[in-house]
Image (cartoon, rainbow, N blue to C red):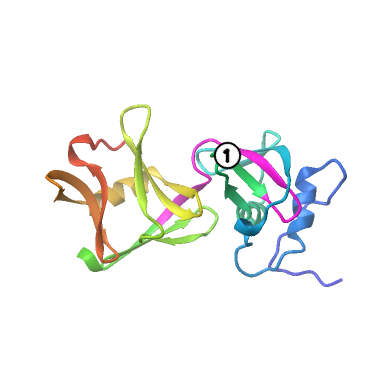
Amino acid sequence: MTTDPTRPELPTPTTDSALGRLGAALGDLPTRGLPPVELWHPKHCGTIDIRIAADGTWFHEGAPIRRPALVKLFSTILRREPDGSTVLVTPAERMTIRVDDAPFVAVEMAVDGEGELRRIGFRTNVDDLVPLDDDHPIRFEQDGSGGFKPYVKVRGGLWALLTRALTYDLVDLAEEREIDGRDWLGLAAGGRFHPIVRTADLKVAG
């Protein structure tokens, strides 16, 4: 049998291993492009002991998954459900996982140009490339200390939390504009202004 060098070695499936079953199902999928998870509607098979920490680290049964290629592969079958839960889904089964904050972390940012013509793109911890545009908006949420955390939409209902360093870089690019009589801090990019937060409410988490 010929081994495909572009895919990581998957867990050996066993009758009592949900992770193994997921790996076996992924082994039958095409190697190019994202799987069409939005078209899959298998039965819900309960919860699998996988947790994505706020820093983007994946854990299985309490231990970090130390194979980046495997994490990247499993990240392609994540889906946000209407009830707000996050699942790993294949054509055969659907299992709920725990996500402490966002399923992805934006770890790099690229900026090209200035003003309305500026282009901004992000790379996530699993190498998704995400442009800031109408399909991939940015939003800020208030954290427990009164500061704000920025997120960029990756796909579906899945978002990436920006690292603290990127948050400061993003704020350095922001400018203030008046919208409907109120001052907003936002970004000019992709041909329009993206409001982030009202200037009066802005307090980046330190």
Q: Nearer the viewer, residue 28 or 85?
A: 85
The residue depicted at 36 percent of the width and 60 percent of the height is 134
Q: Main secondary structure of the magenta part?
A: strand
Query: Where is residue 141 drawn, in percent x and y?
Result: 36, 38
What amino acid is found at the position of numbered circle 1 in the picture?
A: Ser
Query: Where is residue 76 drawn, in percent x and y?
Result: 61, 56
Q: Quadrant of the C terminus?
A: top left
Label 1 sits on residue: 85
Q: Quadrant of residue 29?
A: bottom right
In the image, is 204 to the left or to the right of 37?
A: left
In the image, is 192 to the left or to the right of 36?
A: left
The magenta stretch is 89-108
- Residue 52 in the magenta stretch? The answer is no
The residue depicted at 67 percent of the width and 33 percent of the height is 62
The residue depicted at 34 percent of the width and 27 percent of the height is 145
Q: Quadrant of residue 96?
A: top right
